[in-house]
Image: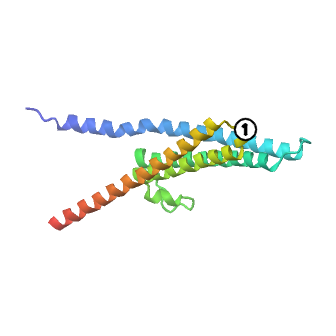
C-alpha cells in the first residue's frame, strides 16, 4: 500500500498557506482607515470653519458633540490598527518588529485571547462615546433610541466581562494542565 505521507504533507502545506488569503482583508482595512482619516479631517475643518469663519455663534454643547465625534473616529482608527496589526501578526505572519522603536507595547505579547480582550475594550470605549453624545444631545433623541443605546452598551459590557472570565478560566486550565504534565515527567 503506497504511503499517503507526501499527499498529506502537501495538503497540510496548502492549508497553512491559506492564511495568506486574509492579507487582502487587512489591506482593505487599511483603506478603510484612510477613509476615517478623511472623515476626521472633514469634521475638523467644519469645526474650525464654524468656529472662526462662519460668523454664527456655536455653543459649547455643539463643540463638545463635534469633539466627541472626532474622538469616536480616533477610537475606531485605533480599533482598526489593533485588528490590522494584531490580526496579521496572530493569523498570517510575524511582522519582525523586535527592537523597532515604534513597535507597540501590546504587540510583543499579542495572541488571539489578548486581541479579543483589547478589541472588546475598544468597542466598549466607542460605545461609551456614542452614549455620551446621546446623553449630551438627549433633548433631540427619542426615549426609545436612548433606551436601546443603553441596552446595547450594557450587552457590550457583559460580553467583555464574559470574554475576560472565559479567558481567565482557559489560562488557569492551561496552567493546571502544564503543572500536571510537568509533575508526571
Number of marks in the image?
1
Q: In the rendered image, is residue 185 in sight?
A: no
Quadrant into which the C terminus falls:
bottom left
Q: Which residue is mark 1?
A: 140
Q: Nearer the viewer, residue 20 or 156?
A: 156
Left or right of residue 155, residue 125 in this image: right
Q: Nearer the viewer, residue 137 or 107?
A: 137
Residue at 84% across, 43% down? 50
Residue at 52% across, 47% down? 154
Quick one: which residue is furthest to the front in this view?
Answer: 143
**Residue 82: horizontal and vertical position, in percent?**
52, 49
Q: In the rendered image, is residue 112 in sight?
A: yes
Quick one: which residue is furthest to the right in this view?
Answer: 55
**Residue 56: horizontal and vertical position, in percent?**
90, 42
Quick one: which residue is furthest to the left in this view?
Answer: 1
Left or right of residue 171, residue 40 in this image: right
User: Residue 31's quadrant in the figure?
Assistant: top right
**Residue 115: horizontal and vertical position, in percent?**
45, 51
Residue at 72% across, 43% down? 137
Quadrant into which the N terminus falls:
top left
Left or right of residue 18, residue 107 in this image: right
Residue at 70% across, 42% down? 138
**Residue 65: horizontal and vertical position, in percent?**
73, 46
Residue density around tag 1, few if under 14, some if 14–19, many if 20 or more, within 10 Å: few
Q: Secondary structure at mark 1?
A: helix
How does the figure colour the protein chain or chains?
rainbow
User: Residue 33's quadrant in the figure?
Assistant: top right
Amino acid at each position: 500500500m503506497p504511503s499517503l505521507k507526501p499527499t498529506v504533507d502537501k495538503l497540510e502545506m496548502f492549508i497553512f498557506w491559506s492564511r495568506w488569503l486574509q492579507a487582502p482583508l487587512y489591506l482593505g482595512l487599511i483603506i478603510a482607515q484612510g477613509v476615517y482619516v478623511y472623515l476626521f479631517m472633514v469634521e475638523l475643518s467644519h469645526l474650525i470653519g464654524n468656529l472662526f469663519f462662519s460668523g454664527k455663534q456655536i455653543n459649547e454643547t455643539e463643540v463638545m458633540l463635534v469633539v466627541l465625534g472626532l474622538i469616536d473616529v480616533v477610537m475606531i482608527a485605533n480599533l482598526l490598527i489593533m485588528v490590522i496589526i494584531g490580526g496579521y501578526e496572530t493569523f498570517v505572519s510575524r511582522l519582525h518588529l523586535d527592537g523597532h522603536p515604534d513597535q507597540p507595547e501590546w504587540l510583543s505579547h499579542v495572541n488571539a485571547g489578548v486581541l479579543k480582550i483589547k478589541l472588546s475594550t475598544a468597542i466598549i470605549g466607542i460605545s461609551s462615546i456614542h452614549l455620551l453624545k446621546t446623553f449630551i444631545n438627549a433633548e433631540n433623541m427619542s426615549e426609545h433610541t436612548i433606551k436601546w443605546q443603553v441596552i446595547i452598551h450594557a450587552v457590550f459590557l457583559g460580553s467583555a466581562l464574559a470574554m475576560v472570565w472565559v479567558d481567565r478560566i482557559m489560562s488557569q486550565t492551561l496552567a493546571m494542565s502544564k503543572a500536571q504534565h510537568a509533575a508526571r515527567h
